[in-house]
Image (cartoon, grey):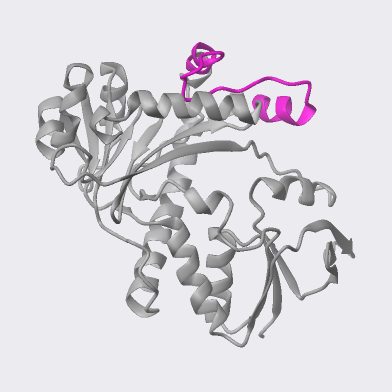
Amino acid sequence: MNKRIVIIGGGVVGLATAWELIKRGHQVQLLERNAEPGSATSFANGGQLSYRYVAPLADSGVPLQGMKWMGKADSPLNMRLRMSLQQWRWLLQFLRACNNQTNKMNGDHILRLSLLSRQVMQAWRDEDNLADFHWRRSGKLIIHRREYDFNKAAKGIDPQYQQALNAEACLQLEPALKHISPSLQGGIYSPGDETADCHQFCLALLDKLNASSDFSLLTQCEVRRLHKRGGRISSLETSQGTLTGDEYVVAAGNGSGSLLGHLGVRVPLCALKGYSLTLPYPEKAGIAPDISVTDYGTKSFMPALANSCVSRRWWTSATTATNCAKAAFQALKKHRRPQLS
């Protein structure tokens, strides 16, 4: 039975959901609070399509490491604690998940979802004639600067799809890493991983959606409240009036928590704010990585997208945005190659 489905959120998740539902014969109305879809988190997404290497943040050693990071301007994780019941509830849940058993369980779940994502992406690329979004099977190398971290990561790989490389092998694979060779311990290489431009992918999906008579888009439409009746969502209160559908999908990112909270549904979300520097790809070989490189210790990564070299790093948004941005960009400048300036 075909249904009329309303999707809240026009980022990559909302757009991908809309495309899949259209392909299945449903009518879809997509609501986006900004002027254009794909203009928030999806606009400068990291661009890494990592399928085999999954590492849930919650792990046995993370709380202690997080305490060491606190207050340091260039640390990869910087959270400002507040008098917020929501924040402290999330922190308690996170701490409870920081054990080996939960980490493995979550890793297995993520891997299953990741492999399904790869299957869907492959099908869409082969069958749906999407516009170019700079997809490339570049491979991914996660480098480690601490011997303990490298040894732990090496024990968890799937040898059929991943390789644990010592420092010398990492430099042979990616010569652009030679400037950090004194601190390099090794890396985990996944040759089947990919890179793509998330924003261009959003535009490619939107182009296909706009060609369907079953699709409609409302931009600058802020959803303010979900109303329910009989245990089901009955309507949406938005900045453009009341909207209804047969089914609803909430894909509003961090904003999903407050929307669902009105219905008594508690979603444990903590937003991370990422920062990136995009630079022209150098003509000289061996300066910028040709494969996608992630630095495990600094939580920064550098995928090559089209003619650009992008250095990205994640940071928590639970702090003053201006101060956080200044510190994040300083950290990015510190860890990039001098020749890329």
Quadrant assignment for the C terminus:
top left
Write the residue at 55% across / 77% down.
209
* Viewer-proximal residue among 165 and 307: 307
Residue 107: percent from the left, percent from the top? Answer: 44, 40
Q: Quadrant of residue 322?
A: top right
The verdict on residue 115 being magenta is no
Q: Is 147 left, or right, of 83 in this rendering? A: left
Q: Is residue 63 in view from this perspective?
A: yes
Where residue 22 sits in the image (x, y, percent)? 57, 79
Q: Is residue 189 left or right of residue 336?
A: left
Residue at left offset 85%, top offset 49%: 262
Q: Nearer the viewer, residue 310 or 3?
A: 310
The span shown in magenta is: 65-92
Q: Which quadrant, please, contains the N terminus? A: bottom right
Spot occupied by residue 95 in the image (x, y as percentages of width and height): 60, 23
Q: Residue at x 83, y 67 (%)?
A: 240
Q: Is residue 318 visible?
A: no
